[in-house]
Image (cartoon, helix red, strand yellow):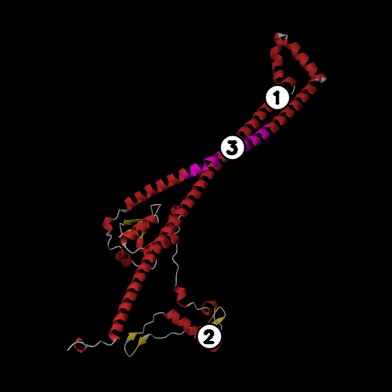
Amino acid sequence: MFHVKDGRAHCHVVWSRIDLDNMRAIGLSYDRMKLRTCARELAHAYGLPLPEGLTEDRGDARFERTRDVTFAEKAMAEASGIAPAERRKAITAVFRSSDSAATLRIELERAGYVLAQGERRAYVVVDRAGHVHALARQVEGTKTRDVKARLSDLPPESLPTVAEAQAQQTARQKAVDERLREKARQRGAKSATDLAAKQQARRNKHIEAKRQQLAIIHASERMALHATHKAEQGRLFNIITSKVFDLFDHVPGLRSVIAPLRRNPAINPAKRHRIEDEALERRHQRDKQAIDRREVALGKIEARERRGLVRDLLRQTRAEDVQKQAQTEQRQREARETSHDIAAERTDDARSAADERRARMLERLERARQQPSGPRRSQRPGWE
């Protein structure tokens, strides 16, 4: 069926899959790959352009899928600090290097994992953070039956449960953290003391400079206000007003009349001066309190800096401890490989020596066989 769609002419072809001779449907497996191959052949034969999806043929590689990391694995990685790929790589290396179930269990414990009995699976591993992983899913290129065959000498009933393994990992991690914290405390005691002294000197210097600057500003403001008040008190109107108020104060009947006038700052300059002095003092107190709050805030920031220093030292100590442990394991592995190679060389040397002795013995027997035999005793002279 030919038709035009969006300005592009194309056709649809329909085939019958029914085999009339045998009266059954013809198999249509891998039809998309066959159609892709057919499309490329037709395009090559008729010189037609191919779209980008058909130009590059990756073959079976286009169906390969990398294993996606789930949200649960991401959360576990953030909690334990071990990426899923690194965990699988480490467990796979341990599984392939071990030759027995007991060796596998010991090597897993050295790598930081505990082999346990699972609830739904026979064998699981528990990492440092207490997360449970199926052992067969952590070993790359190995099936469950291979794992069970390797651990046939170690039945699941003899292993600790998941709860017991998690308790072991918690206690072990707690001991490791305490040991690392002690190392960090010992290493960071002097650094923290030096940092605290530097922070104290820096804070004191900064705060004292602010206070001195603020004291100079406050003194200049008080002096300016005092000068303004003096100049205002020297005016003729203010002098007359104060004299009148003092005169009225001596008359008891007029005190109640002039009391509202005395409280009015627009008329009584002394009242206004007192209000301005109090307002200026309150503002100065607020400025001083702001300096004190700044000092407290700097103290909190410096405390966080000291805690961060201890945390960084702890991380550095943990990294160094892990590196030392890895180096120790590498040296032990190399020592085992060296001893194995030496034993193999000794075995080869012993075999070579035995082969040489056997060759010499065969050579002597061959020479003895090739030498001519002497005369018989009856044929020797002096015998009759």
Mark 1 = which residue?
277
Q: Where is residue 377 in the image (x, y as percent from the top left)?
A: 20, 86
Gap in Å between the C-alphas at discs 3 and 2?
A: 80 Å
Q: Where is residue 69 in the image (x, y as percent from the top left)?
A: 44, 61
Locate the C terminus and report the quarter of the image it occupies: bottom left
Give the amino acid type for the residue marked by disc 1 in the picture: Asp
- Magenta span: predominant SS is helix
How crowded pointer 1 is (Cα within 10 Å; few <14, some 14-19, many 20+) is rated as some
Q: Is residue 31 left or right of residue 354?
A: right
Q: In which quarter of the image is residue 47?
A: bottom right
- Res. 236 mark: none
Give the amino acid type for the residue marked by disc 3 in the picture: Ala
Q: Nearer the viewer, residue 169 or 351?
A: 351
Gap in Å between the C-alphas at discs 3 and 1?
A: 40 Å
**Residue visible at 78% across and 17% down?**
241
Mark 3 = which residue?
197
Badge 3 element: helix
Q: Position of residue 157 (x, y in %)?
A: 26, 56
Vertical side of 228 occupied by 249: above or below = above
Q: Give the range drawn in magenta.
A: 183-211
Gap in Å between the C-alphas at discs 2 and 1?
A: 97 Å
**Residue visible at 51% across and 87% down?**
42
Mark 2 = which residue?
43
N-terminal label among 3 and 1: 3
For residue 332, say whether it is visible.
yes
Badge 2 element: helix
Asked if the stretch drawn in magenta spans residue 210, the answer is yes
How crowded pointer 3 is (Cα within 10 Å; few <14, some 14-19, many 20+) is rated as few
